[in-house]
Amino acid sequence: MVLEAAARFLEVRSRSIAEVRRRLTSAGYRADLVDGAIVRMMELGMLDDAAFAQAWVESRDRAHPRGERAIRLELGQKGVERAVVEAVLAARRAGGTECDASGDEASGDEATDSRLDPDLAPVSADRAAAERLVAKHERPLARVADPRQRRARAYALLARNGFDPETCREVAASMTATTDLETDTS
């Protein structure tokens, strides 16, 4: 009975162990039955916080780019242990060093060249996610005539989505510089 309730809860999307535990406990199931169901689901591979966290980060990077701070907070609210979150974010950073601004993985030759040429330096995962977020909001930002105000709005957008101040500053500045160049050539 408890296992069935947990399985129904997981039908919609994957969940963390803590989310399943909260749901089953709030539904009135005894703690020992909830623990048994969670152990069994972990044995079956239906519950895995590391896989959940990895999928969450990949989903965020793809659909709703967020900075590390926001992702860390979201996963913490889902009940994922801090060590698991840090491991997943470290893997994101390691994988992000081989990504270009569009999030596509760089080929081995390009990665080697980027170490030799500072102009081809790899883009961090956070920076790539920030650039994707700004690109998604490019049209409304481009409508702001004043470059300083446009940069401030881009910075605020990035800060609201959990990017660190340095990334916000760099991406907002590069976005306004690119927009200004396009306006000048038109």
Image (cartoon, rainbow, N blue to C red):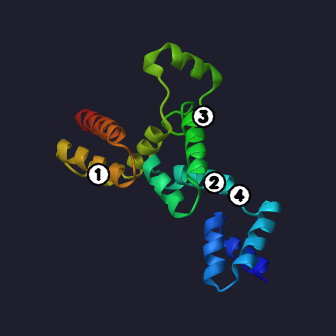
Q: Please, which residue is most extreme toward the top here?
A: 116
Residue 37: quadrant of the picture: bottom right
Q: Residue at x 55, y 44 (%)?
A: 89
The mark that comes first in sequence, 3 or 4, is 4
The mark that comes first in sequence, 1 or 3, is 3
Identify the element where label 4 is drawn. Answer: loop
Q: Residue at x 82, y 61 (%)?
A: 43
The mark that comes first in sequence, 2 or 3, is 2
Task: Say whether residue 7 is left or right of residue 99.
Answer: right
* Mark in front: 3 vs 4: 4
The mark that comes first in sequence, 2 or 4, is 4
Expressed as whole percent of the image width and height from the top left, the position of residue 125 reads: 50, 39
Q: CA distance from mark 4 to mark 1?
A: 35 Å
Is residue 67 visible to the viewer in this orientation of the structure? no
Task: Say whether residue 56 is left or right of residue 69.
Answer: right
Identify the element where label 3 is drawn. Answer: loop
* Mark in front: 1 vs 3: 1
Amino acid type at mark 1: Ala
Task: Identify the residue position indicated by label 4 in the image.
Answer: 48
Q: CA distance from mark 1 to mark 3?
A: 28 Å
Task: Identify the residue position indicated by label 1 in the image.
Answer: 156
Amino acid type at mark 3: Glu
Labels 1 & 2 near each other (Cβ < 8 A): no
> Badge 4 local density, few (<14 within 10 Å), some, or many (20+)?
some
> Badge 2 local density, few (<14 within 10 Å), some, or many (20+)?
some
Task: Identify the residue position indicated by label 3 in the image.
Answer: 105
Labels 2 & 4 near each other (Cβ < 8 A): no
